[in-house]
Amino acid sequence: MTSTTEAGAGGEISGDQVPRRLSILGATGSIGLNVLDLVAAEPDRFEVEALTAGRNARELAALAVRFSARIAVVADPSAYAELRDRLAGTGIETAAGAEAVAAAAARPSDILVSAIVGFAGLAPSLAALGATRILALANKETLVSAGPLFLATAQRAGTRILPVDSEHNAIFQVFETDNARNVSEVIITASGGPFLRTPKEQLATVTRDMALRHPKWSMGPKITIDSATLMNKGLELIEAYRLYPVSVDQLSVLVHPQSVVHGLVRYKDGSLLAELGVPDMRTPIGYCLAWPKRRPTTVKPLDLAMVGTLTFEAPDRDRFPCLPLAEAAMRRGEGAPCVLNAANEVAVEAFLADRIGFLDVARVVEATLDRIDGEGGLSEPASLPGAIELDGWARKIASACL
């Protein structure tokens, strides 16, 4: 395992360096828009190099003009004509397709924010290594599907990896690398999602709209559904296992409905260190953009007196079987996390399309893991083509299990 503080030691930049050249993969998503909100608050501190989006050409073009990006890229080639037409005469370069997104990621930058949702973020994140000095990673699927490959490549390339997820960013802030041997536990918090108190028998009737009503966070549909099933916590456990020099047995999940404490690290001397803040992604994003120093952000300060009470409880693994499935995949290791992620993406997409029920998400994931494990297919991907092949196989099996 390679910790974030070790990966890419050559990627350090001065906290006073201004402006910083910035690229954003997934600029029109919730993370990308929060990044640009912070950039707008301090425009002299950043120069935008590249912005990419999936297919939202209209919003991407508007953002590219507003922030004077050098290039704008849509992953969906069918959206290219609109992007090209909207940016005609601006001097902003345009391109389309998966290879163009990877090429945009490979343009030199000081900071690249990787916020593409799902396995699709792996290839461009890999392409950015060596081209960017700091990669602020908001795409957990990269570490879940091909963590050892990604981190080893980052180490060789000299790119520093900083976690953007609120939980891992919190842990990064309180994990003392020099005292790693004295860490006894790393705790990831979970809000519990919209169904924290829903009886198990009622979960079978959960609808798409019900699952998309997260009580604390405003996120894209895929991660919101993952939060509702608690798969998101499972993926984050795997992510933490990749990022920090800890064993599987040192990782745990704690349900914390107020979403004020984002992550905790327990030390053998009895200390329990935590990062607290309002549930606002601009806090961890701002930390990454300013690292290794800190800068003011537009986030309102946390008022503990107003919050009043902080509560914690153990997750219910019986009502939320996606969490133990992810824990088992983490323990199994090798290619199991990649298969878990691929099957989950297929199942979540089917649920969002009203093709399967809420409880079917876990059923599809479990069936896919069992099938591929039975065929001896859970070996660790050693390359990007290997990860793509395993991901594609898992998606094919998962689709047959819907």
Image (tube, rainbow, N blue to C red):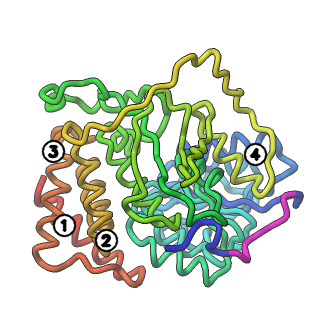
Q: Between tags 1 and 3, which lies in front?
A: 3
Q: As shown in the figure, which amino acid type bears the numbered disc 4?
A: Val
Name the one closer to the observer, 42 or 242.
Answer: 242
Amino acid type indicated by mark 1? Lys
Residue identifier under label 2: 333
To which residue does mark 1 refer?
A: 396
| Mark 3 or 2, nearer chain start | 2
**Residue at the spot 77% in from the left edge and 58% down from the top edge:** 292
Distance CA(mark 4)–CA(mark 3): 41 Å
Q: Which mark is residue 84?
A: none
| Label 2 environment density (alpha carbons within 10 Å; few <14, some 14–19, many ≥20) | some
Mark 3 → mark 2, Cα distance in angstroms: 24 Å
Report how far apart the C-alphas of labels 4 and 1 lie in the structure.
41 Å
* First along the sequence among labels 1 and 3: 3
258 vs 96: above or below: above
Q: Which residue has dot 4 on it?
A: 39
Q: Position of residue 279 (x, y in %)?
A: 57, 32
Residue at 47% from the left image edge and 66% from the top image edge: 242
Q: Which residue is mark 3?
A: 360
Q: Magenta region: which residues?
A: 9-15
Tell me, yes or no, whether the highlighted magenta stretch contains residue 288. Answer: no
Q: Earlier in the sequence, mark 2 or mark 1?
A: 2
* Residues at marks 2 and 4, CA–CA distance in whole angstroms: 39 Å
> First in sequence: mark 2 or mark 4?
4
Count every numbered label the image shows and give the total. 4
On screen, residue 201 versus residue 37, left or right, reads left
Residue 64 percent location from the top left of the image = 69, 51
Q: In the rendered image, which quarter is residue 379 located in?
A: bottom left
- Count neighbours of disc 1 (C-alpha within 10 A) and say few if under 14, some if 14 to 19, many if 20 or more: some
* Label 4–label 3 contact, CB within 8 A: no
Circle 3: residue type: Asp
- CA distance separating discs 2 and 1: 21 Å
